[in-house]
Amino acid sequence: MQGIFKPLLRYLDSSIQEAITQKQSFLLLGSRQVGKTTMLNFLTGNISPLLRYYLQNPAERISLERDPSRLIREAQVINDHVFIYIDEAQKVPALFDASQLLIDERKAAIFFTGSSARKLRRKGVNLLPGRIKYFILDPLLWGELGLLKKSTLSNPFPLSLNNINTTSYSIEDAMVYGTLPAIVALSQKDRTEILSAYSHLYIEEEVRAEALSRNIGAFSRFLELAAVESGTNPNLSHLSQESGVSMPTIKEYYSILEDTLIVERIDPYIKNARKRILSSSRYYFFDLGVRNTLARFSMTPALIQTEKGKLFEHAVILEIVRRVRLLKKNWKVYYWRTSGGAEVDCIIETENELIPIEIKSSTHISRRDLRGLTSFISDYKDKVKRGFVITMGERPERIDDIIIALPWQNI
């Protein structure tokens, strides 16, 4: 925590605060425990009149399921324009229809939070297009943990941010325990226990809510295997055999994880390819602490010694994806790998260029480490103006006219 009662600052705070000030309705999506409720409780603490509906409360949820129009009646009885905060709105989708009336009549500004876009889409929920804004809240970014160093480069990393908090958390902590806000201030033992409880709660509540209760055992086995393979091209046939469910079901499971914001899907870059390119997607679990817990890894700093390369790559990919989303860039993140084994961990496609990024957990880079990067630059030289190697080194280093080795703290 920052201060005694104030939560850590979040990059999204200013955008959410602006929407509240302008009486603009919005939907804030994010996985469970990323801090949605904490953020909204803090930012709405001084506005009035405010009606709050916490749908995690079974009594509140059941009451509104039976009578969604209660929302309208309780707002209309108030003389003034009213603010309404509905937490975990996907649990009672009918509230979106009730909200439309209040928004259209300019009676209320309504703030929704939710953790499953899947449930909303599957039930054909009216997501109020043109009436509300949409935001996604991720686990803490590096600058929200105070991990970044100010860049001195004349041409800095295209998604650079500044620190907005100061914490004692380290990159090694983030690689083992992840960056869920509730984890950061805890001891090692408490972090492990909370992450274990979180994983079980996800299976018991979120998965059951997705109508998979009959297959909970198979899904649990799949979840462990998928966590182990996070960041790789998953072998669907192997996952099918090991979990005891069909390949179509495995694909559906991945779809569920993606729709509930538990994994990030990274597609291969295959546009104008001159070589045979692998075409399967990669999936990165949204938080390394959750991933490591689900994979049943030893939740101690010793994990860094055995999994350092994979963990560092995973952490950097998540940071890049989160920044693209936060900064509202209309950019796409890919990976690139040829059948001959040439590979680039991350390709950012902007409106004007391709930015290839290799990720190395070492402190020093040799030319031999960059064969994939130089191969990609050669194949797409008309679109590549710059490339980066993100390392665990201390200082930036120019490798050639295009490639810069950049410590992770400087991105």
Image (cartoon, rainbow, N blue to C red):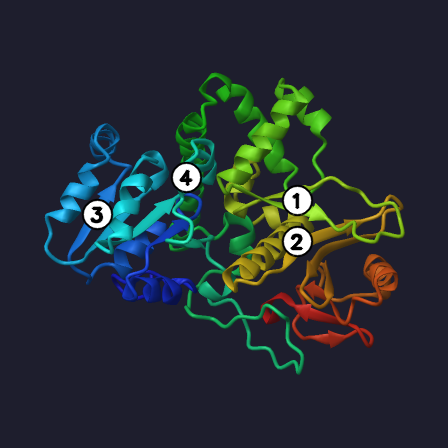
Q: Which amino acid does label 3 sit on?
A: Arg
Q: Position of residue 98 (x, y in %)?
A: 27, 41
* Residue toward you, 255 or 214: 255
The answer to whether mark 4 and mark 2 are in CB contact below 8 A is no
Secondary structure, mark 2, is helix
Q: Name the residue under label 3.
A: 52
Q: Nearer the viewer, residue 135 or 335?
A: 135
Q: In which quarter of the image is residue 398?
A: bottom right
Kindly report the distance in space between the C-alpha atoms of the residues bearing marks 4 and 1: 24 Å
Specify the amino acid type for callout 4. Glu
Residue underneath mark 1? 231
- Between the residue at mark 2 and the residue at mark 3, the CA separation in whole angstroms equals 40 Å
Is label 1 in contact with label 3 (beta carbons under 8 Å)?
A: no
Pick whichever, 231 or 282, lies toward us: 282
Residue 123: x and y in percent read 43, 31
* Residue 341 relative to residue 363: left or right: right
Determine the secondary structure under disc 1: loop
Vertical order, 226 against 370 (above or below): above
Q: Are marks 1 and 2 in contact (CB under 8 Å)?
A: yes
For label 2, the residue is 313
For label 1, the crowd category at 10 Å Cα-Cα, with few meaning under 14, some 14 to 19 and many 20 or more, is many
